[in-house]
Image (cartoon, helix red, strand yellow):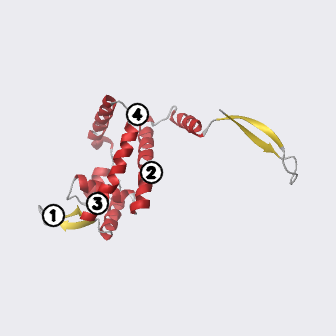
């Protein structure tokens, strides 16, 4: 418990004034918790807000690290991640499977091509289609970054028991499966 004091000036330029007790002030961690509880209480969007809260605190520090260490934006990372999980996608498909704006994915693709992390080739299954592939440099960059995402997710999920993690994954899977009823591309 911390008691906050303030100094009351008795006159301009006359030095120290009298100390006033302005009451108890919570420590930084306690203050954060109190503010968060106030925002969450009777929240009209209780699930969406919580999902965004978790996502922001999960990805924010990782994006800052990528920008500083690898000069990659969040959208560029999303393209690398998707192409690692599913090669031969185009920018529109990446936009669809991530819910990210087409313009930000298209810009990321251009930047990644300039950096030599991806290339665009004619699809071997359909010569009318152009698809994206990771270069060896793109694969190495991905491998260097994904470790931090895995470690951060583990730290975040340590708050849950294994059965709770499986249930959370099941529930998110259910919401994602119903995306065609609520998700609107933008």
**Between residues 64 and 113, which one lies in front from this camera angle?**
64
Check disc 4 and report its element: helix, strand or loop.
loop
Residue that appears at 35% across and 30% down: 161
Distance from disc 1 to disc 4, alpha carbons, whole Å, reads 44 Å
Residue that appears at 76% across and 36% down: 21
Residue that appears at 34% across and 67% down: 111
Query: x%, y% of residue 83?
Result: 25, 56
Q: Earlier in the sequence, mark 1 or mark 3?
A: 1
Label 3–label 4 contact, CB within 8 A: no
Distance from disc 2 to disc 1, alpha carbons, whole Å, reads 36 Å
Q: Earlier in the sequence, mark 2 or mark 3?
A: 2
Distance from disc 2 to disc 4, alpha carbons, whole Å, reads 19 Å
> Which mark identifies residue 61?
2
Distance from disc 1 to disc 3, alpha carbons, whole Å, reads 23 Å
Q: Residues within 10 Å of mark 4 (few under 14, many from 20)?
A: few
Which of discs 1 and 4 lies nearer the camera? The answer is 4
**Between residues 169 and 6, which one lies in front from this camera angle?**
6
Query: Disc 3 marks which residue?
Result: 140
Query: Disc 4 marks which residue?
Result: 159
Corner quadrant of residue 27: top right
Query: Disc 1 marks which residue?
Result: 123
Corner quadrant of residue 92: bottom left
Corner quadrant of residue 71: bottom left
Q: Earlier in the sequence, mark 1 or mark 4?
A: 1
Which quarter of the figure is the N terminus placed in? top right
Query: x%, y% of residue 103?
Result: 35, 61
Check disc 1 and report its element: helix, strand or loop.
loop
Say above or below: 31 vs 104: above
Say above or below: 162 vs 132: above
């Amino acid at each position: 418990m911390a008691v906050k004091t303030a100094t009351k000036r008795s006159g301009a330029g006359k030095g120290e004034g009298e100390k006033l007790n302005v009451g108890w002030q919570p420590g930084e961690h306690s203050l954060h918790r109190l503010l968060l509880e106030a925002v969450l209480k009777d929240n009209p969007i209780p699930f969406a807000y919580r999902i965004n809260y978790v996502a922001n605190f999960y990805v924010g520090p990782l994006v800052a690290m990528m920008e500083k260490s690898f000069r990659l934006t969040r959208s560029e990372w999303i393209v690398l991640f998707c192409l690692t999980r599913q090669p031969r996608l185009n920018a529109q498909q990446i936009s669809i499977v991530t819910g990210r704006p087409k313009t930000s994915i298209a810009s990321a693709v251009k930047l990644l091509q300039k950096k030599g992390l991806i290339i665009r080739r004619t699809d071997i299954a359909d010569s009318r289609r152009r698809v994206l592939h990771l270069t060896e440099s793109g694969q190495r960059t991905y491998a260097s970054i994904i470790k931090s995402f895995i470690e951060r997710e583990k730290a975040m999920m340590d708050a849950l028991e294994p059965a709770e993690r499986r249930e959370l994954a099941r529930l998110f899977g259910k919401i994602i499966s119903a995306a065609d009823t609520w998700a609107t591309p933008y």
